[in-house]
Image (tube, rainbow, N blue to C red):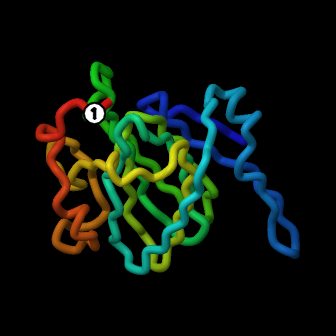
Amino acid sequence: MQITALAITDVKLIVPKRFGDRRGFFSETYNARVLEESGIKENFVQDNHSLSADVGTIRGLHFQKPPHAQAKLVRVARGRVLDVAVDLRNGSPTYGKHVAAELSAENWAQLFIPVGFAHAFCTLEPDTEFLYKVTDYYAPESDGGVLWSDPTLGIEWPVAADKAVLSDKDARLPLLKDLGHVF
């Protein structure tokens, strides 16, 4: 596995090796020992899988508040996304800043997003399947988020605001300035 820190160094881009032949390929997509050697010592407890039918579907920016905060390890099994993590850690020098990476079935990249970040992705291809491991179980009472289009975040989404496919919940999330300190 190749593991690289992004501009916000706690967020890591992980590219597992993929071995192919005429039958297809084999890849070890998760190895706790390898991740721990690179500083990722999380205990993942739940796997999630989503399908987004339309290009321009945005899911997020989501997080879970303590005591059920989640770190995530995310990847794409089919299709392609722009994946975004926003730093919400109180006192962090990168608070309110974001990093983004393209994840796809072709590039086989994954993103590790630690506790204290909001997370979202925007589909770049139809019928995109997105998988993520999380470090705590989903707890509705800890559910939170930030509006994907908050101008103070400066995220350059690959879809116009009026073309984005959103859930009602995601369309009504608060701006960062109205969120308060969560982490």
- Mark 1: secondary structure: loop
Residue under pointer 1: 182
**Left or right: 182 as drawn, with respect to 74:** left
Q: Is residue 100 left or right of residue 178?
A: right
* Residue drawn where x is 59% and y is 57% of the image: 47
Which quadrant holds the C terminus? Answer: top left
Query: 106 or 65: nearer the eye?
Result: 65
Q: Residue 31 at what x, y percent from top left?
A: 75, 43
User: What residue lies at 54% left-to-right and 48% top-to-bottom?
Assistant: 134
Q: For the residue carrying disc 1, how many other residues have a C-alpha within 10 Å: few (<14), some (14-19), or many (20+)?
A: some
**Residue 166 quadrant:** bottom left
Q: Is residue 114 above or below residue 64?
A: above
Q: Position of residue 156 (x, y in %)?
A: 27, 53
Residue 97 occupies which quadrant of the picture?
A: top left
At label 1, which amino acid type do we have?
A: Val
Q: Is residue 121 left or right of residue 182?
A: right
Nearest the eye: 99 or 119 = 119
